Image (cartoon, rainbow, N blue to C red):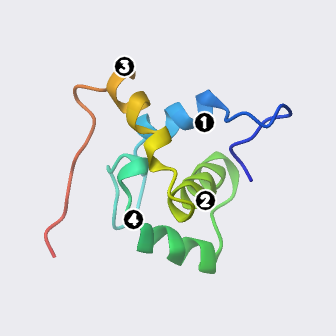
């Protein structure tokens, strides 16, 4: 699993990025990663996550949501530097 370091503790920097980084492209461009819908992450998991840091973050988020661990991100949303202005952009379907 991608969120663990050598001591099997979640890497807080990775978790912090999940609540701050925006999706850089695609249907959900501008959405904070942790706000991405689970079906989108499942689609990426089936298709293959992109290379690099974004792929690692999306794969980590997929595992978090798959295992019902979203509660780990809630405290970070409140104390991150963008906590008061993070994107809650939602598209109407």
Q: Nearer the viewer, mark 4 or mark 1?
A: 1
Q: Is residue 36 left or right of residue 49?
A: left
Q: CA distance from mark 4 to mark 1?
A: 22 Å
Identify the disc placed on residue 63: 2
Q: Nearer the viewer, residue 25 or 13?
A: 13
Q: CA distance from mark 3 to mark 2?
A: 25 Å
Within 10 Å of disc 2 (Cα), the crowding (few <14, some 14-19, many 20+) is some
Mark 4 Cα-neighbour bin, 10 Å: few <14, some 14–19, many ≥20: few
Q: Give the image location of residue 79, x and y in percent.
A: 37, 20
Neighbours of disc 1 within 10 Å: few (<14), some (14-19), many (20+): some
Quarter occupied by the C terminus:
bottom left
Please name the residue that numbered disc 1 is placed on.
Answer: 14
Tell which circle, 2 or 4, labels the residue nearer the N-terminal end.
4
- Is residue 56 or residue 62 the one in the foreground? 62
Q: CA distance from mark 3 to mark 4?
A: 25 Å
Question: Nearer the N terminus, badge 3 or badge 4?
Answer: 4
Q: In the rendered image, is residue 2 in sight?
A: yes
State the image coordinates of residue 39 (x, y, percent, origin top left). Answer: 43, 74
Alpha carbon distance from label 3 to label 1? 15 Å
Label pair 3/2, CB-CB below 8 angstroms:
no
């Amino acid at each position: 699993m991608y969120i663990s370091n050598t001591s099997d503790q979640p890497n807080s920097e990775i978790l912090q990025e999940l609540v701050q980084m925006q999706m850089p492209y695609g249907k959900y461009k501008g959405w904070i990663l942790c706000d991405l819908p689970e079906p989108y992450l499942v689609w990426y998991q089936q298709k293959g996550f992109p290379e690099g840091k974004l792929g690692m973050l999306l794969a980590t988020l997929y595992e978090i949501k798959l295992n019902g661990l979203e509660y780990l991100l809630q405290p970070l949303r409140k104390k991150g530097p963008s906590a008061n202005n993070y994107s809650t952009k939602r598209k109407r379907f």
